[in-house]
Image (spheres, rainbow, N blue to C red):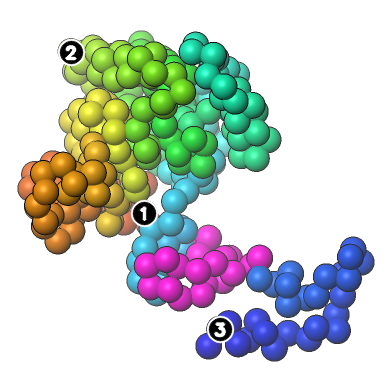
Amino acid sequence: MIIDKIKKVSIQEETPKKNVRAADMLIGKWVKCDACKEILYKEDVRKNYSVCPNCGKHFRLSARRRIAQIIDEGTFNELNADMQTRDPLNFEGYLKKIESLHEKTKIKEAVTTGIGEINGEKVVIAVMDGNFMMGSMGSVVGEKITIAVEKAIEEKLPLIIFCVSGGARMQEGMISLMQMAKTSAAIAKLNDAGLLYISVLTDPTYGGVTASFAMLGDIVLAEPKAMIGFAGPRVIKQTIKMELPDGFQTSEFLLEHGFVDKIVERKDMKDMLHKLILMHK
């Protein structure tokens, strides 16, 4: 077992600080897959597009890593990087939590937008990040996505949005909910302009994001085994008081029922996006 190899590391070797055991240090280099329960070396997972080499589970990605995987190196120009979160409801502790997340994640909001190239083809891209408030959609997320859509219209470029979200941001109440209408209206203008919009659903995509721009793509792609829906399966089961089908709300279930056009593995995503852009150019 790989965990036994970790335990066999000499406990005599010490670091200069606090006499921490080498075995304790090595623990930080491993990650457990919550699907197959295998202990994996982090560097191997990273090299495999953050996908479990044992069972194929797609681990969640930061916006930074996602952009590095999809956009050609050196071509990404971020839009509205300094847009700041406000506290429209004076929600207790909200701004303090936002500041804490700034320090922890080194990003300012749950979506990063910009212009870049995919195998030489210029696109506008928005990438949501579940590490920041579980990708919940507040006023800044809605505004940044809307401006990205408007930029695509202005530059006559394809739009790609990678979605990951737990839903609307409760700390902003109705201000958060209205972002569904705002982003949907922007996507409608993009459609009227005859421009391509590809939505990519990753794990999880829920709530107001699903109910708005996530499902409005001309082409809707999804990563394998991503959970996608409006309310969670537990809430639905309690509401309708019925057993749910096997695989309910997975990307495979949605593909079977016509809500998703294609499931694409992460290693193939960049080439797939490039092919779709060329087809619609």
Q: Which residue is drawn at 41% across and 26% down?
A: 170
Give the CA separation, mark 2 to mark 3. 55 Å
**SS for dot 1:** helix
Q: How far apart in space, not on screen, are marks 1 and 3 (Cα)?
A: 26 Å
Residue at disc 2, secondary structure: helix
Residue at x-position 51% and y-position 75%: 39
Q: Quadrant of the C terminus?
A: top left
Q: On the image, numbered disc 3 is attached to which residue?
A: 2
Amino acid at dot 1: Arg
Residue drawn at x 78%, y 86% is 10
Does the stretch in magenta take in 258?
no
The answer to whether residue 232 is visible is yes
Secondary structure type for disc 3? helix
Q: Mark 2 points at which residue?
A: 192
Disc 2 versus disc 3: nearer the observer = 3
The residue that label 1 is drawn on is 266
Q: In this view, does 256 lie to the left or right of 220?
A: left
Residue 161 x, y percent position in the rendering = 35, 32
Please identify the quarter of the rendering in which residue 217 is found: top left
Label pair 1/3, CB-CB below 8 angstroms? no
Q: Which mark is residue 237?
A: none
> Badge 3: few (under 14), some or many (20 or more) residues near its Cα, within 10 Å?
few
